[in-house]
Image (cartoon, rainbow, N blue to C red):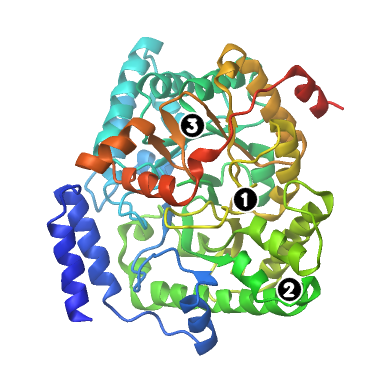
Amino acid sequence: MSDSFEQRCQQIVTSLRLSPEQKRHFLALEAENALPYPTLPAKARAALDDGVICDMFEGHAPFKPRYVLPDYERFLANGSEWLELEGAKDLDDALSLLTILYHHVPSVTALPVYLGHLDTLLQPYVRILTQDAIDIRIKRFWRYLDRTLPDAFTHVNIGPADTPVTRAILRADAELKQTAPNLTFIYDPQVTPDDLLLQVAKNICECSKPHISNGPQNDKIFTKGQYGVVSCYNSLPLAGGGSTLVRLNLQQVALRSNSIDDFFTRVLPWYCQQQIAVIDARCEFLYQQSHFFEHSFLVHEGLIDPGRFVPMFGIYSLAEAVNVLCEKEGLAGRYGKDETANALGYRISEQLAAFVENTPVKYGWRQRALLHAQSGISSDTGTTPGARLPYGDEPDPVTHLRTVAPHHAWYPAGISDILTLDETVKRNPQAVVQLCLGAFKCGMREFTANVSGNDLVRVTGYMVRLSDLEKYRAEGSRSNTTWLGEEAARNTRILERQPRVISHEQQMRFSQ
């Protein structure tokens, strides 16, 4: 074990592709993973070792939560005793304070994954500044975020209201076309004006951002303004976050089942229980042994509350599970192509949601985990993220959205799909608006689109520049997530999403 550990460390320190900071991060991961894993029941340990359950490589000793969502509003108002900072008086103060706090917000990536609901946070500090003055400051700040937090899992929320800061962020994001930060626009039909949603659609055409979240749907789960969308597509309580994310490989569960009935009555419930055991073990270490919540100034100053952290019960490879089960029953249907197969997929999501809702966890917001359709990792092979349709053989955009929409009601911690639209949509961004509104009408909580021809594209949820993937193979990258995108491009077929043209006939189908 020692020789293997030393060899891995030696490979890291001698890498031609990694920066010194990236080497430090990977060396720290090696050190953590040299420690014993939290004690697990034998059956849960076997499920983890067999790959039916995946702990997302969070590390053997969870000494910090996976995702942290501080109450930045409280911080800007009060400052921080620990950081020796007074509250903000103007926009310059607010931006400066945020840049300081970001470096003290941990996550699984070692960088903050939630940078705040920025337009709501910053607008009170704008005061008498002109739009030009706001634009200059936001663009400078946007560039700062990408250069000092070079990780595409960093995430900003904006909307639903139309403010000068909202417009400034959209302008900066479209112009700079950076991989970081990721961006979600929270849409509310009672608040968001039509021309703002159209501008969001124009931004998507320009740089494949932002992701659009159905605000009223999330409000029902978390209450209005009390959540954030972070990292890729993770919806979590504000002033709390995600303690851990463990995911279930549904394809492997299906392969271990004798029939559809056996899957639902015996095998799926059994592996769900093993996943809860892994979640509980990891959370027990975090809460009882790491001392994070005892010593963090974020807790002492009221910026996070240990009771608002929730473990995420993740799943993936639903498509493959459905196809395996259909084969076992001699059915010809395939997920995304057949109503019977699709109905089987909806049944799986519904049963998972019922299990998570009715199963207590040792440590968690409301004493429950939250179900999450996990959007894949770069090392996945032969599986499809979450409840998505398999890559490369998707139907037209409307059929695509209508097929996946019924799943969205069951995954409160986040679910996603990625449409890839033909670049002709740039001439008609209103078509993106209609697709989004139609999707929300069908029950979708999240709407995301890549536009073919753009250099900036979404991978599983984070952003990469296609031009950076080629450069990385030769010289590395200043972005911490380029290597993930490069690996995902090789392993997960992410670039095989077929660009689809939006026709007027398809748009009409949403209104029928």
Q: In which quarter of the image is residue 318?
A: bottom right
Relative to 355, is 35 above or below? below
Q: What residue type is labelled 1?
A: Phe
Task: Mark 2: give few (<14), some (14-19) or many (20+) Cα within 10 Å.
Answer: many
Task: Of the two numbered discs 1 and 3 on the same chain, state the one appearing first in sequence.
Answer: 3
Task: Of the two numbered discs 2 and 1 on the same chain, state the one appearing first in sequence.
Answer: 1
Which corner quadrant holds the N terminus? bottom left
Residue drawn 76% across the image and 46% down it = 337
Residue 288 can be seen in this image: yes
C-alpha span from label 2 to label 1: 32 Å
Task: Of the two numbered discs 3 and 2 on the same chain, state the one appearing first in sequence.
Answer: 3
Q: Name the residue under label 1.
A: 222
Percent across and percent down for residue 366 are 61, 65
Label 1 with label 3: CB-CB less than 8 Å: no
Task: Mark 3: give few (<14), some (14-19) or many (20+) Cα within 10 Å.
Answer: many
Q: Mark 2 points at which residue?
A: 263
Percent across and percent down for residue 143 are 29, 28
Q: Quadrant of residue 437?
A: top right
- Which callout, 3 or 2, points to the residue nearer the camera? 2
Extreme residue toward the right, this view: 512
Judging depth in this view, the residue of 309 and 303 nearest the camera is 309
Q: Name the residue under label 3.
A: 120
Residue drawn 62% across the image and 76% down it = 271
C-alpha span from label 1 to label 3: 17 Å
Q: Using residue 187 as the reference point, say whether residue 17 is left or right of it.
A: left
